Structures are given as structure tokens and as C-alpha cells.
Amino acid sequence: MNGFRSTFSLLICSILLLFTSCNSNVFYEKSDPIEKGIWDKNHILHYQFEVKDSMEYYDIYVDVRNTIDYKYQNLYIFLTTEYPGGARFTDTLGCILCDKYGEWYGKGKGEFRDNNFLLMRQVRFQRTGIYNLYVEQAMREDELQGISDFGIRINHFKPQKQRKDQASN
């Protein structure tokens, strides 16, 4: 029985390694669970990463997990970017979570829906150093119910290769 467990454990570890190594496109990723699915207006989420190459391009995504009990069509957030050196810029972003008929976007069945929003495509960080992102909900409710997780993902930008039959058109 111990031989089976060690073989099974080795198999699981190999599968996990395979899946994690296939996603080498990710530069930075962090997701924060929202305690009890209630995002307090004073709960500011923090994301920090270091840029070492100011010539590289990235795609930046916002990942939102909501419950089907979320009572709005969209989610507004304040995103504050703090650049190396301390300069700050704040922007308001909107994420559409369902259509006007109440049909949820995103993936999932049952209670949760996972949405991935492209925030910026092919962006370059002008300076090397530490960047901080601060995110707060901007929905005019002190306690916003129905958001269970929020995250930021930054991928290395990879230009898509054009197929030969498309290039001749």
C-alpha cells in the first residue's frame, strides 16, 4: 500500500509541475479572497511587483469572482498605481459581470462566476523598480456583497503569429 501512495503522490506532483510549467507566460499573479464575500469600502487590496526590464511589454488583467447573488450588472473599482519614485495615478474601472437580462458572463456553474478582464494590452512599464497597485471597490456601498475574490494578473506580451494563408490577403 505504501508503494501505491508514493507512486500516486509522485504522479500528482508530476501533473502539477506540468500544469505550472506550461504557464510561463505569467509575470505576476495574485488573487485575494474577499472574506465572507463582503468587500468593505475600507478594505484596500494591495499588489506589488518588480519590473527589471523597462523595454518588455505586458498584458494586464483583472480577475473577478462573484456569486450569482451579486445584485449589480457591473463592478466599479478605484485602481491606484504607485510608480517607482512614489508618483501615483488613480483611475476608475468598470467590469461588466452580466448582461441587461441578468445572464452572467464568465466561466462557472453553480454559485460562482469567474471573469477575466483585459485591462491593458501590450503595455510597457517606463521605469524599472517596484510598482504598487491598490484596489478598492467603488460601488457606493459600505459593504458590497457578492464578490468573493479579486486578483491582478500580468502576462508577458506574446505577439500572435500570423498564419501564412492570412498573410497573403
Image: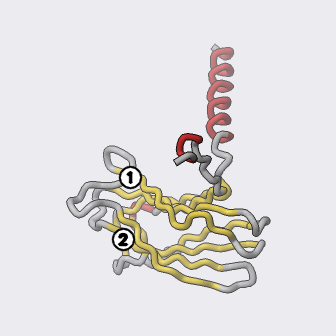
Label 1 to label 2: alpha-carbon separation:
20 Å
* Residue drawn at the location 28% of the way across and 59% of the way down: 69
Residue toward you, 69 or 156: 156
User: Which image quarter: residue 125?
Assistant: bottom right
Residue 58 percent across, percent down from the top left = 64, 62
User: Which image quarter: residue 144?
Assistant: bottom left
| Mark 1 residue crowding within 10 angstroms, few (<14) / some (14–19) / many (20+) | some
* Residue drawn at the location 30% of the way across and 62% of the way down: 70
* Residue drawn at the location 29% of the way across and 67% of the way down: 72
Colour mapping used in the image: secondary structure
Q: Which residue is mark 2?
A: 144
Q: Is residue 138 left or right of residue 71?
A: right
Q: Quadrant of the N terminus?
A: top right
Residue toward you, 139 or 126: 126
Residue 59 percent across, percent down from the top left = 59, 61
Q: Up-down: is 18 above or below 6?
A: below
Query: Residue flagged by tag 1: what amino acid is it?
Result: Gly
Mark 1 falls on what kind of element?
loop
Residue toward you, 85 or 35: 85
Query: Residue flagged by tag 2: what amino acid is it?
Result: Leu
Residue 19 percent across, percent down from the top left = 62, 37
Q: Is residue 23 left or right of residue 55?
A: left
* Residue drawn at the location 73% of the way across and 72% of the way down: 130
Q: Which residue is mark 1?
A: 106
Residue 62 percent across, percent down from the top left = 51, 63
In this rendering, which labeled residue sits more in front, label 1 or label 2? 1
Q: Up-down: is 51 above or below 6?
A: below
Residue toward you, 152 or 99: 99
Query: N-terminal of the two: label 1 or label 2?
Result: 1
Mark 2 falls on what kind of element?
strand
